[in-house]
Amino acid sequence: MSSRATLLASIIGLPLGFVITLTSFPGKRLTITCLNTLLALSTVGKITCCETLVRYSEQMLLPLRRLLVLVDQTPIFFTGPVWKNLYFGLKAKR
């Protein structure tokens, strides 16, 4: 998205968001539901990860999922430092 489009969306969207949030009017719930639905629609553009174009197929996503690691901030395995959790997760992944 271009910087102009981002700036224009911010100029229009931020004040409108404040008005919707701070005022009470008939149809407010429907308006919020419609806006949330619009946010869920797919956008135009390319999704890349590690300079690789991501396509929506299991064959393409599986190798990318293997590159990603989720690190939970709640100590589950160890009560020690975070690096021990990371080490355990990387060791278990192999």
Image (tube, helix red, strand yellow):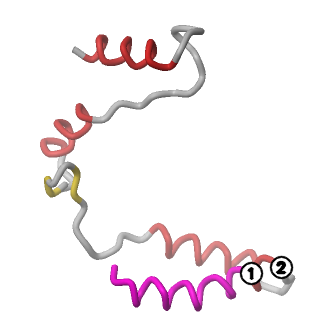
* Residue 18: mark: 1
Residue at x 50% of width, y 76% of height = 38
Question: Quadrant of the rendered structure where residue 68 is?
Answer: top left
Residue 5 in percent (x, y) is at 41, 88
Mark 1: which amino acid? Phe
Position of the C terminus by quadrant: top left
**Would residue 2 be counted in the magenta stretch?**
yes
Q: Nearer the viewer, residue 26 or 77?
A: 77
Position of the N terminus by quadrant: bottom left
Question: Quadrant of the rendered structure where residue 85 is?
Answer: top left
Query: Which residue is outermost to the right?
Result: 24
The residue to which callout 2 is attached is 22
Q: Nearer the viewer, residue 38 or 48?
A: 48
| 30, above or below 60, in the image | below
Q: CA distance from mark 2 to mark 1?
A: 6 Å
Q: Are marks 2 and 1 in contact (CB under 8 Å)?
A: yes
Does 16 sit left or right of 7 as displayed?
Answer: right
Residue 72 in percent (x, y) is at 51, 27
**Would residue 3 be counted in the magenta stretch?**
yes
- Give, as a single range, the part of the protein colored magenta: 1-18
